[in-house]
Amino acid sequence: MARILVVDDDPRLVKVVSTLLRKHHHRVEAVPTGELARQALRRGNVDITLLDVNLPDVNGLSLILEMRQEGNDVPVILLTVRTEVHDQTLGLRLGGDDYITKPFNPEVLLARIEAVLRRTQGTAGVQRDDEADDHLLEIPPIVIDFAARQVFKNGEVVRLAPLEYSILEFLAANRGRAVSKEELMLDVWGTSRGVSRTLAEHISRLRRKLGDGLIVTQTGYGYLVPGAR
């Protein structure tokens, strides 16, 4: 299991890629802009990044160069519609570890991710044998098993609907960071339109099942699962 940051402003692509990666037991954080990617990468806890070259606020190649100049060596796979050899070569020379052109076959993407992780796992912080419990997150009295997609409260299994679990997983993976409603809706539903009330209903059900203190409302912005004290 790896912790994967997906940086792309196409909600449909993000939804497909995130679903695919989670089915293979990876933990996924998705952001639509370069600025949010910077914040996520500076927080750490990322094993590999899938980075769109054409972001709305910054060129992905510039973001790679900035990362490497800051000493951030998290592996990066570029997602690009550019097929010119020059563009692909430039991305690799600036610090990219691999590239894949859009549209791509999901199985090819998985294979590329696995190949990059094999090459870099010595320095990228990917789960090792002595980190076998890395897939567990404990926020007493709640324990989340990301690999099994199960949630426990006081040692008892809590039955969550698939969308409820997806919301909790995204908030927990971003523990300690306030997540906007738009970002959360894009990750879970693949759109930020027309699902705000549905999101609020799912949050309410999660609180009834898990307790009021786990998910904190950030008024006028979104939600937060508090970090470790």
Image (cartoon, grey):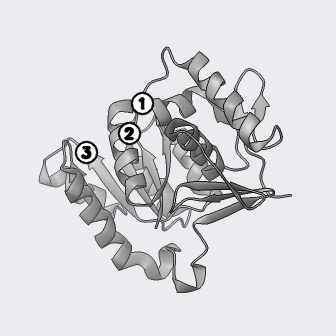
Please provide percent x and percent y for residue 15: 38, 38
State which mark lies toward you, 3 or 1. Answer: 1
Gap in angstroms between the C-alphas marked 3 and 2: 14 Å
Vertical arrangement, residue 9 with respect to residue 70, above or below: above
Q: List the residue tagged with mark 2.
A: 14
Q: Are marks 1 and 2 in contact (CB under 8 Å)?
A: yes
Q: Nearer the viewer, residue 51 or 153?
A: 153
Vertical arrangement, residue 148 with respect to residue 101, above or below: below
The answer, for residue 10, to whether it is visible in the render is no
Q: Which mark is residue 80?
A: 3
Q: Which mark is residue 190?
A: 1
Name the kind of residue labelled 3 in the image. Answer: Thr
> Does label 1 or label 2 sit earlier along the sequence?
2
Please provide percent x and percent y for residue 165: 56, 43
Would residue 90 be found to the left or right of residue 50 on screen?
A: left
How many numbered marks, from 0 up? 3
Would residue 95 be found to the left or right of residue 136 on screen?
A: left
Q: Residue at x 61, y 74 (%)?
A: 133
Name the kind of residue labelled 2 in the image. Answer: Val
Vertical arrangement, residue 137 with respect to residue 223, above or below: below
> Does label 3 or label 2 sit earlier along the sequence?
2
Quarter of the image for residue 199 reads: top right
Quarter of the image for residue 76 reads: bottom left
